[in-house]
Image (cartoon, helix red, strand yellow):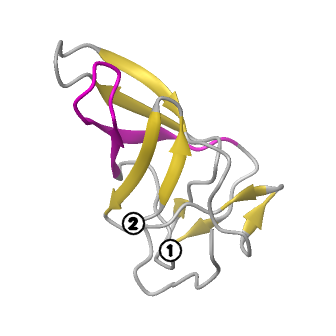
Amino acid sequence: MPGSPVSIGASVMITPGASGPPDMGTIVAVFPPVVTANGLPLATTGSLCMMINSVWGFPYPLVIGPTASSGVQVAGRGLVRTFDRIPTPPGILLILGPPAAPFITDQWPP
């Protein structure tokens, strides 16, 4: 899904969540090496999200799965963009945003 890259603080949603209903979360860490835009490190596959279980309310970590942009990669990890749907156990992770650099659009397929 073509879109603008995201960074730390972007909202994400996993469907189904840990207990069934979708869980919401935020990207909290982007691991080196990183590429930046607008002074922010851009998220790649392998970045860390902190999710909140929608049924019980407990937080849990979730690593972004391996499938994102096929054209823009940093050290072999695909760039994560707004509205990407990334297979990440236990479900599909939807990247909601906001974008780190709305003036950049990655047109490569996942």
Marks 1,2: beta carbons within 8 A: yes
Q: Amino acid at mark 2?
A: Phe
Q: Is residue 57 above or below residue 26?
A: above
Specify which label sits upstream in the sequence, 1 or 2: 1
Residue furthest right as drawn = 75
Disc 2 designates what residue? 83
Q: Which mark is residue 34?
A: none
- Picture coordinates of residue 90 (x, y %)? 47, 29
Q: Residue at x 36, y 48 (%)?
A: 9
Which residues are the magenta region?
A: 11-31
Q: Residue at x 54, y 46 (%)?
A: 87
- Picture coordinates of residue 34 (x, y %)? 69, 55
The image quadrant of residue 49 is top left
Q: Residue at x 51, y 84 (%)?
A: 104
Disc 1 designates what residue? 1
Instruction: Classify residue 50 as left or right of residue 80.
Output: left
**Magenta stretch: residue 18 in it?**
yes
Nearer to us in this view, 90 or 2: 90
Q: Is residue 89 above or below residue 35?
A: above
Q: Residues within 10 Å of mark 2 (few under 14, many from 20)?
A: many
- Picture coordinates of residue 48 (x, y %)? 53, 35
Nearer to us in this view, 105 or 100: 105
Q: Residues within 10 Å of mark 1 (few under 14, many from 20)?
A: some
The image quadrant of residue 78 is bottom right
- Picture coordinates of residue 46 (x, y %)? 65, 41
Q: Is residue 5 above or below residue 42?
A: below
Q: Secondary structure at mark 2?
A: loop
Q: Amino acid at mark 1?
A: Met
Instruction: Classify residue 1 as left or right of residue 18.
Output: right
**Quarter that holds the C terminus:** bottom right
Q: Secondary structure at mark 1?
A: loop
Q: Residue at x 58, y 44 (%)?
A: 30
